Image (tube, rainbow, N blue to C red):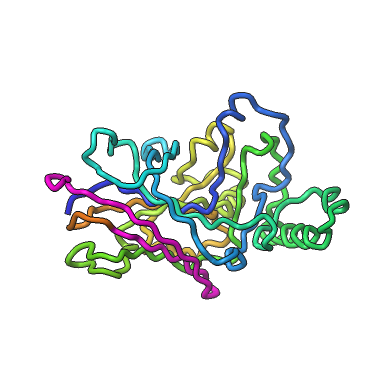
Amino acid sequence: MKKILLFFSISVLISACNNSYCDEPPKSVLHKSYIESFLECGKVANRAARVLITVGTEIDSVTGIIASNKNYVSDYNPYSPAYDIGKEKIGLEITVVPKRDDGSLYRDINLSYIEYSPNYQFYARQKHVYDSCIAVIGDTAFNKLTYSATIQVVAIITPVSEIIITCDADFSADFPKGSNLSSLFTVFFDDPYSTIKNNYQAVEGSYRSQAALECDYPQSIIKTNLAEAHFADRPFIGHEWECFLDVAPDYTGVYRFAVKIILVDGTELTGVAPIVIKLKGNLD
């Protein structure tokens, strides 16, 4: 079974920084709290995850920096001259996308905006839930000047129990069609709660996105095996998971991968996407 670096980015909007803003920063603002929004995945419309195939993510295990210049593709050929598999990671971007007013996203909302909004009660409740969450976490002393609209740290309210990845074809003799492939993946995910408890500093041994580095923002991205992540023991984690498949399948063909995110309350969010995997010596 040949090794590849096939990246599966489970992304539910991780912290991001627009380079154009960093090059020409707009007016800075004071952030009292590190986490700017809390996401209640169980209330997201349709309980669906968006799945896209991506190329361009780079991980430096020496510096601990994760760089992402993603493009979207329809297949994966690790032996094509177009891809340098030593640098560019191929994967799936799985994103839970809440609608702005679907009641699943609780944000730090300006009080004057609430007062004059026609949806006063809705935004007042959002603000109440947000304030309650940061009080429970103790996230009230970040007090950092940062660039407006460049950094958005979002944490999930209901913890994740597990993330299961399967496919609709035989992956190998040991993993027939429908098998749980989670043990074959390494996962990266943001842990803002650990950053807060570490006095708003990155946890030792964690990774950091290039975006956070450029904007001088603390971040603790954890790396572990997907089947051994113990998500339920990690409250208020971020809402993106980037996973890479450690081994190639035994067979060439089209694999439709299904991703299931299970919360501790039993809620499930799902998404699927096809991806073509071609092995050396057996190219079309």
Q: Is residue 9 visible in the rendered structure shown here? A: no
Q: Residue furthest bottom?
A: 266
- Quadrant where the C terminus sits is top left
Span of residues in magenta: 255-284
Point out the image quarter for the N terminus: bottom left
The residue furthest front is: 284
Residue drawn at the location 50% of the way across and 70% of the way down: 268
Question: Residue 280's image quarter?
Answer: top left
Q: Residue 54's quadrant in the figure?
A: top left
The answer, for residue 26, to whether it is visible in the render is yes
User: Residue 80: x percent and y percent?
Assistant: 23, 37
Q: How many marks on residues?
A: 0
Q: Is residue 279 magenta?
A: yes
* Occupied quadrant, residue 118: bottom right
* Front-most of residues 27 and 189: 27
Q: Looking at the magenta stretch, what is its main secondary structure?
A: strand
Q: Nearer the viewer, residue 94 or 284?
A: 284
> Could you tell me residue 90's position as x and y percent?
34, 45
Q: In the current view of this chain or complex, which residue is farthest to the top?
A: 24
Q: Residue at x 23, y 67 (%)?
A: 175
**Residue at (34%, 38%) from the top-left corner?**
88
Verify whether residue 124 appears in magenta: no
Residue 232 is left or right of residue 224, and the answer is right
Q: Residue 243: image x %, image y %?
A: 38, 52
Seen from the viewer's position, the closer of residues 103 and 142 is: 103
Measuring 65% from the left and 27% from the top, which residue is drawn there?
25
* Residue 56 picture location, percent across and down: 39, 38
